[in-house]
Amino acid sequence: MADGVSVKRGYRLRYTLIALALALSSFVLTTFTSAQDAPVDPSLAAPPHAHTIHLKHVLVISQTRGFEHDSIPDAMAAIYNMGRDSGLWDATLRTDTELLTKKALESNAKNLDYFDALVFVSTTGELDLDDNQKKDMLAFIKDDGKGFVGVHAALDTNYKWPEYGELIGGWFDVHPWSTFNAPIVNEDPNFPAVRHFPKVFVKYDEIYQAKEWSRDKVNVLLSMDPTKLNYANPRVHRADHDFAVAWDKMYGKGRVFYSSLGHTQEAWSDPDIRRMYFEAIKWVLGMTEGSTASHPRR
């Protein structure tokens, strides 16, 4: 009998708890409905809405009139996917230079006025640009304040166009060590595109030697450790042994980023390299902030 009483008490307790839960739910629902039906006080501020991100438009160019890198498709796909996966930009991928103009184009083609940033992916040689296109491209960055990112061989481009060298910061002057385990120093760990790198690290890549380049005109972000390089090499031309791996700068109102990292196909599967270019594109788009001031070697 005692067991039967205990069972009955257990059932009563369970039903009581269920009844209380239902009553509480009904109370909450009634209160919520009443609150929705209540008149709105016009003196109160409207509730906040989610921040809307306006999609940016990035034009990616990979025309080659010299050496053609096998990594170009990997780089272009990576930049496209970075924008799609993050929801920050869409990328238009081209192997020609038709869209590098401000004149109206036919067949729904977009000109430079549509885009917010331009990325040169291992372009080489003298690109197919007439004088008006060159003028429009410079104005896009210098006057309109749009962004420019140069990937690897973008330094090996447009040698007959002096303003391009001024825009990007210099030109390619061979790669003394070809592809090797490059000893790299992070000179500006506060900059968004390189803050994920340690102070010193190694990357297997092809690092360019730059000519008509000076750290006085750019903010060096990454450079090679001069104490760990072999100078018994006739292709080493810089007497100062200053080999920058990545830098940023202003060109008029526009932001410019360049890095020689990204020569190999494998580089574009490296999370560090992908993150560097992802953050670089964000920076030239004005989504983040970072210094452009030049500094002595660190």
Image (tube, helix red, strand yellow):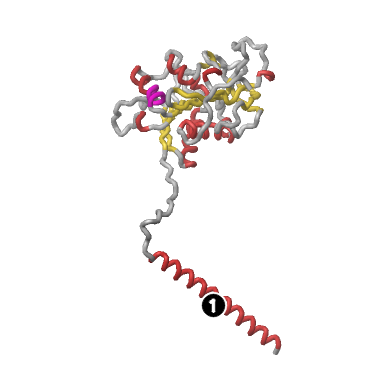
Q: Which residues are magenta?
A: 137-143
Give the residue displayed 60% in from the left and 34% down from the top: 196
Res 57 quadrant in image? top left
Which residue appears farthest toward the front when viewing the image? Answer: 43
Asked if residue 247 is positioned above or below residue 279 in the image, the reply reads above
Is residue 121 in view?
A: no
Give the residue displayed 42% in from the left and 33% down from the top: 58
Quick check: is 86 in the magenta stretch? no
Q: Is residue 10 left or right of residue 137?
A: right
The C terminus - image quarter: top right
Name the one closer to the observer, 90 or 45. Answer: 45
Is residue 298 in view?
A: yes
Name the one closer to the observer, 145 or 225. Answer: 145
The spot of residue 56 in percent (x, y) is 42, 37
The spot of residue 131 in percent (x, y) is 35, 17
Which residue appears farthest toward the right when viewing the image? Answer: 2
The N terminus - image quarter: bottom right
Give the residue displayed 41% in from the left and 68% down from the top: 34
Secondary element under disc 1, as helix, strand or loop, is helix
Quick check: is 139 in the magenta stretch? yes
